[in-house]
């Protein structure tokens, strides 16, 4: 048992590592145009190039992959003269990077070409002071200094440099001269729970992704809990009556639901209940973060859509499994020894017949996640699915990567849970 | 079913005999016949649309968002294009043609769904037969890679691929290939592990045939039955996927009609013209169900035949 678990965990780890590499590789092909997205199509090549450097995109791909995976603070710490620490922002609570200079949290920024230190006191207030920096002499004779800037980068400033830096601010692109040479975006890496900054919102991905995931979880969980008993019941019913009209009706309904794309089912439901009958809202408008709890009506159509998509699959597997069990000799024996039909089905057949669907459902979690994405986009639910969709459309690779890794880990973990459940349910498999 | 026609023939059957065999298997299943009828209906509509549609599918010739009338049997869309003509022509990209580039227009026969599945079968088949026949390290490496691909929810993978490579027919073909190949590879690997133990493989090895010859000429041809049925099912998934991608706004590029994109467009005008969304949605649903029924019926009949 322990060996089984260890082997599974090792293979899971390898899979996740490969997934992360594949994902990075794919997004790497895409990442080239992000500066156009952020700056607009009329940005000059210099502006784009400057932004690229500020995002740390000038580093080689393998280095960015390692940064993304395990963090960049490993390679940043030796460069900085002061210890680097993370501390929550007093207003938003999002983690920020600071350098600790003699016990005072400090960052640096350029004001009119002069390096200025921003110091945060213990009560959260910030004050600025001229930077008392110690310039280091670089091998080529110039004077450099590594410090943290206000955008969570470790920046190498060079005294008297005339390299032009174009900084993207709310007011547009601002030109700065005489300072930053290299940027290392500070991050802890996805393994340690920091997925970097979202390029779309300029906030940490991990600060938003979990509340979105919670919405998805409510949606998918409710659909799952509602459809499972129904689908298992219908599947068993069809399997027991194999070949008869009841079986035909259930099987064909199931096949119809499985083969119809989720968005088509959703659109039919919207047309019927949202537009013609006007019983239910056709879109889910989230006025507040907890809209799901305040107005559960907005979830009815999305849940029905997901239920329809799942129903067919589970019912089909259950039917096949039940029909197979009903053909086995031990069921025939039970009938022959005169047991009542009810008893044969419930006491003898059901337990064995439910073995297959329960584990197959776990394997199908990927498919459920796909359905959730479509349903969220269709109904406008701010969940993980629409998050990854919006991020992918924008080209926000940090957000896409984090959301994709989250979905993959959910899938891999449920698969492990499915294996374990199978072990528990099936007494014929035992590990010595 | 007549058992004498289905008994294994002692000599290799001629092409006619084979065809008759396949046809009798097909006609034996009501499910398969229904599915085939639906597929042939859409195929016919698609072929017809190549030469004739009631109105030019891309012409903005009418008022926008009209309900069904005698001139526009299904009404018009938000740009005043005839929906029935567009639904007809929408069959082409799925089943009949793939646009390699739109400017200049380079078109190859065979729809996006078909090329995607062919790609998945070729890539998956080669990976699977190599994993199964060579075994050991090769097997482990290939399966580990495929496990990683399978771990992705398919739509997430589509999203990532399409954002990485942009939209277009070829990208959709590629996306279907990448998402489909792991499944095919697993199937082929399983079949290979079984076929590998047969005598004729031993014989080929004793003759000193190369590994490539054995994999391509001995193993794959003997595994083609299950692979074909699986491929048929995959055509259904592929049409499903093309529809979903179109719905998400990532599908085949305009202006040529694509059912998923039509649904996506009509969705924005659902209050002005609710019926418009119905037609492309119905088209996708019926074609996918048709392909699925066909593949399902075929599989059931074939397994019964093998028993």
Image: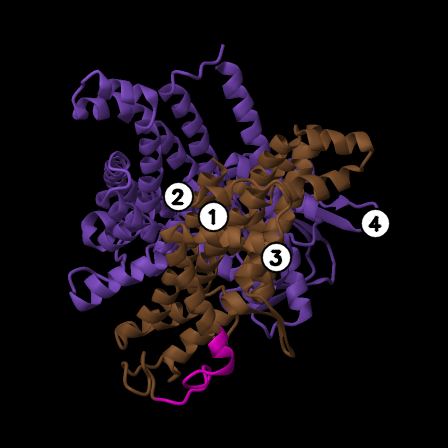
Chain colours: A purple, B brown
Reply yes or no: does residue A101 show up in magenta. no
**Left or right: A429 as drawn, with respect to A249:** right
Q: On screen, A112 above or below A419?
A: below
The residue to which callout 2 is attached is: A210
Lower sequence index among marks 3 and 4: 3
Give the image location of residue B221, x and y in percent: 65, 44
Identity of the residue drawn at 53% across and 16% down: A3
Q: CA distance from mark 2 to mark 1?
A: 9 Å
Give the image location of residue A334, x and y in percent: 25, 18
Q: On screen, B265 above or below A234?
A: below
Check disc 3: other Cα within 10 Å, few if <14, some if 14-19, many if 20+.
some
Main SS of the magenta segment?
loop
Check disc 2: other Cα within 10 Å, few if <14, some if 14-19, many if 20+.
some
Q: Are marks 2 and 1 on the same chain?
A: yes
The secondary structure type at the circle numbered 1 is helix
Q: CA distance from mark 3 to mark 4?
A: 35 Å
The residue to which callout 1 is attached is: A205
Q: CA distance from mark 3 to mark 2?
A: 24 Å
Chain label for disc 2: A
Q: CA distance from mark 3 to mark 1?
A: 17 Å
The secondary structure type at the circle numbered 4 is loop
Q: Residue furthest top?
A: A432
The residue to which callout 3 is attached is: A31
């Amino acid at each position: 048992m322990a060996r089984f678990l260890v082997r599974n965990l090792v293979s899971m780890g390898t899979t996740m590592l490969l997934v992360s590499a594949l994902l990075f590789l794919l997004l790497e092909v895409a990442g080239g145009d992000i500066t156009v997205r952020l700056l607009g199509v009329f940005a000059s090549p210099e502006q784009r190039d400057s932004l690229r450097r500020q995002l740390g995109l000038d580093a080689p791909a393998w280095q960015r992959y390692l940064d993304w995976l395990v963090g960049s603070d490993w390679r940043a710490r030796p460069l900085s003269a002061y210890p680097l620490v993370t501390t929550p922002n007093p207003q938003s609570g999002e983690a920020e990077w600071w350098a600790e200079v003699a016990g005072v949290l400090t960052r640096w920024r350029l004001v009119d070409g002069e390096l200025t230190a921003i110091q945060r006191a213990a009560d959260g207030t910030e004050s600025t002071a001229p930077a008392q920096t110690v310039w280091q002499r670089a091998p080529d004779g110039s004077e450099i200094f590594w410090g943290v800037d206000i955008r969570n980068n470790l920046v190498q400033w060079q005294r008297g440099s005339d390299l032009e830096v174009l900084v993207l601010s709310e007011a547009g692109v601002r030109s700065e001269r005489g300072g930053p040479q290299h940027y290392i975006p500070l991050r802890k890496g996805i393994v340690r729970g920091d997925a970097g900054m979202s390029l779309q919102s300029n906030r940490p991905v991990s600060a938003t992704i979990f509340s979105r995931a919670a919405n998805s979880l409510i949606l998918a969980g409710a659909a799952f809990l509602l459809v499972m008993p129904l689908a298992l019941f219908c599947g068993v019913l069809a399997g027991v009556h194999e070949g008869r009209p009841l079986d035909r009706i259930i099987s064909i309904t199931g096949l119809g639901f499985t083969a119809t794309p989720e968005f088509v089912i959703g659109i039919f439901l919207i047309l019927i209940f949202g537009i013609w009958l006007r019983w239910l809202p056709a879109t889910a408008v989230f006025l507040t973060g907890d809209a799901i709890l305040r107005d559960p009506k907005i979830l009815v159509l999305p849940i029905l859509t997901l239920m329809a998509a799942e129903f067919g699959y589970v019912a089909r597997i259950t039917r096949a499994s039940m029909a197979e069990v009903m053909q086995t000799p031990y069921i025939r024996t039970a009938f022959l020894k005169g047991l009542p039909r009810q008893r044969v089905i419930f006491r003898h057949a059901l337990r064995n017949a439910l073995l297959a669907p329960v584990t197959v459902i776990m394997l199908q979690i990927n498919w459920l996640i796909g359905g959730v994405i479509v349903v969220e986009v269709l109904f406008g639910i701010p969940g993980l699915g629409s998050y990854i969709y919006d991020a992918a459309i924008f080209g926000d690779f940090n957000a896409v990567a984090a959301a994709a890794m989250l979905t993959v880990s959910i899938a891999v973990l449920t698969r492990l849970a499915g294996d374990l459940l199978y072990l528990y349910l099936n007494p014929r498999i035992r590990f010595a | 079913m007549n058992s004498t026609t289905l008994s294994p023939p002692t000599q290799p059957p001629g092409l006619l005999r084979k065809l008759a065999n396949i046809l009798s298997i097909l006609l034996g299943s009501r499910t398969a016949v229904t599915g085939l009828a639906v597929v042939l209906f859409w195929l016919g509509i698609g072929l017809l649309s190549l030469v004739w549609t009631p109105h030019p599918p891309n012409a903005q010739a009418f008022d926008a968002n009209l309900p069904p009338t005698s001139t526009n049997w299904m009404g018009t869309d938000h740009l005043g294009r005839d929906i029935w003509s567009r639904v007809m022509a929408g069959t082409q990209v799925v089943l009949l043609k793939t646009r390699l580039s739109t400017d200049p227009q380079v078109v190859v026969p065979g729809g996006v769904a078909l090329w995607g599945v062919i790609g998945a079968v070729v890539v998956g088949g080669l990976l699977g037969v190599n994993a199964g026949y060579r075994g050991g390290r090769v097997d482990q490496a290939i399966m580990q890679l495929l496990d990683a691909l399978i771990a992705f929810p398919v739509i997430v993978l589509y999203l990532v691929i399409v954002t990485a490579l942009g939209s277009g027919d070829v990208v959709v073909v590629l996306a279907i290939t990448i998402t489909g190949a792991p499944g095919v590879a697993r199937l082929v690997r399983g079949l290979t592990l079984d076929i590998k133990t047969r005598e004729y493989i031993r014989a080929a090895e004793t003759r000193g045939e190369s590994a490539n010859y054995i994999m391509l000429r001995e193993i794959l041809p003997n595994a083609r039955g299950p692979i074909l049925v699986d491929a048929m099912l995959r055509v259904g998934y592929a049409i499903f996927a093309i529809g979903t991608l179109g719905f998400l706004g990532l599908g085949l590029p305009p202006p040529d009609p694509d059912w998923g994109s039509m649904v996506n467009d009509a969705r924005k005008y659902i209050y002005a013209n609710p019926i418009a969304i119905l037609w492309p949605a119905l088209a996708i649903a019926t074609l996918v169900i048709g392909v699925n029924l066909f593949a399902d019926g075929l599989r059931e009949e074939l397994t019964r035949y093998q028993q």
